[in-house]
Image (spheres, rainbow, N blue to C red):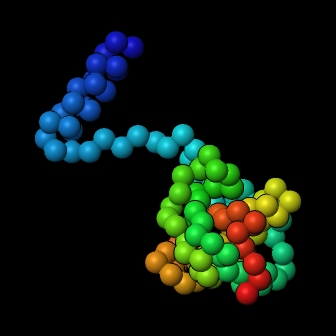
């Protein structure tokens, strides 16, 4: 066990010394559509009512993948927690093309 810990410490130190980066895993790992509990046959395109986070999972404990400005269009493909969180593809704005989760209170039908 000591050898593994020491090897890990040496690897991290070497990366930092030689200009590398050390990336730690997020406490909340990525969750895509696998977290959905409802998939409608049809979902209308929605837009944001204010600036809102596009999250990596259906909770504020997941990290933000970026901000969606007011009026950004989203094509939802499914939802979680009784339609409180929607997972979908961003159709407009700076994050167009990204997939992520948005809290439903900040969405309205287009």
| Residue 87, above or below 14 | below
Q: Residue at x 79, y 61 (%)?
A: 84
Q: Is 66 left, or right, of 99 in this rendering?
A: left
Residue drawn where x is 55% and y is 72% of the image: 68
Residue lying farthest top? 2
* Above or below for 53 versus 20: below
Q: Residue 100 in the image: x percent, y percent?
A: 60, 66
Quadrant (top left, top right, bottom left, bottom right) of the N terminus: top left
Determine which quarter of the picture holds residue 33.
Answer: bottom right
Left or right of 16 on screen, residue 52: right
Q: Is residue 59 visible?
A: yes
Query: Residue 87: where, in percent of width, then height?
Result: 68, 67
- Quarter placement of the C terminus: bottom right
Q: Residue at x 59, y 77 (%)?
A: 70
On the image, the x and y values in percent for residue 109 come to: 77, 82
Residue lying farthest bottom?
A: 110
Determine whether 64 is above or below 91 in the image: above
Q: Position of residue 80 (x, y in %)?
A: 78, 59
């Amino acid at each position: 066990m000591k050898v593994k810990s020491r090897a890990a410490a040496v690897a991290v130190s070497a990366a930092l010394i030689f200009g590398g980066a050390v990336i730690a895993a997020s406490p909340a790992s990525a969750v895509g559509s696998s977290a959905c509990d409802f998939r409608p046959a049809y979902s209308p395109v929605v837009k944001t009512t204010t600036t809102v986070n596009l999250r990596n999972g259906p909770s504020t404990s997941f990290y933000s993948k970026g901000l969606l400005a007011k009026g950004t269009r989203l094509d939802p493909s499914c939802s979680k927690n009784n339609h409180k969180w929607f997972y979908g593809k961003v159709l407009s704005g700076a994050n167009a093309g990204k997939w992520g989760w948005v809290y439903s209170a900040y969405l309205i039908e287009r």
